[in-house]
Amino acid sequence: MLAPPDKRRRKRKPVAERRADDRRRKRLQLKRENQDLHRVELWLSGRAIAGVTRQLIYEGRLTDEQALDHRNFEIALAALVEKQGAHWAR
């Protein structure tokens, strides 16, 4: 009996293909480091997220529909932090 499709093991890519993927990721990482970009992972409470979301909508950076999309929220949040950081880094 076969396992359901979502539980089946995926076939691994050939070694050469995995190495090419690794090289691609490394090039992208180095490009970002050269642009002085840093990855920051944050744990925030639901209350903080709701407040920031409300701020972004109030300021017109996001619409209600855009705020529901996680990716749009991350982009708007990054822009907000960039703006505040640039202001305080003077």
Image (cartoon, rainbow, N blue to C red):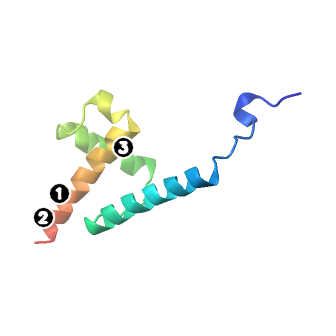
The image position of residue 24, as x and y in percent, is 43, 55
Residue 86, horizontal then vertical, whole percent: 15, 64
Separation (CA) of disc 3 from disc 2: 24 Å
Contact, CB < 8 Å: mark 1 with mark 3?
A: no
Q: What residue does disc 2 label?
A: 87
Q: What amino acid type should be assigned to the residue bearing mark 1?
A: Lys
Image quarter hosting the C terminus: bottom left
In the rendered structure, the answer to whether residue 26 lies left or right of residue 89 reads right
Q: CA distance from mark 2 to mark 1?
A: 6 Å
Can residue 40 be seen in the rendering of this structure? no
Q: Residues within 10 Å of mark 2 (few under 14, many from 20)?
A: few
- Three-letter amino acid code of the residue under disc 3: Ala
Taking the spot 63% from the left edge, 46% from the top edge, the residue there is 13
Residue for point 17% across, 41% down: 59
* Residue 83 image label: 1
Depth check: give the residue in front, 15 or 10: 15
**Cα–Cα gap, marks 1 and 3:** 20 Å
Q: Which mark is residue 37?
A: none
Q: Secondary structure at mark 2?
A: helix
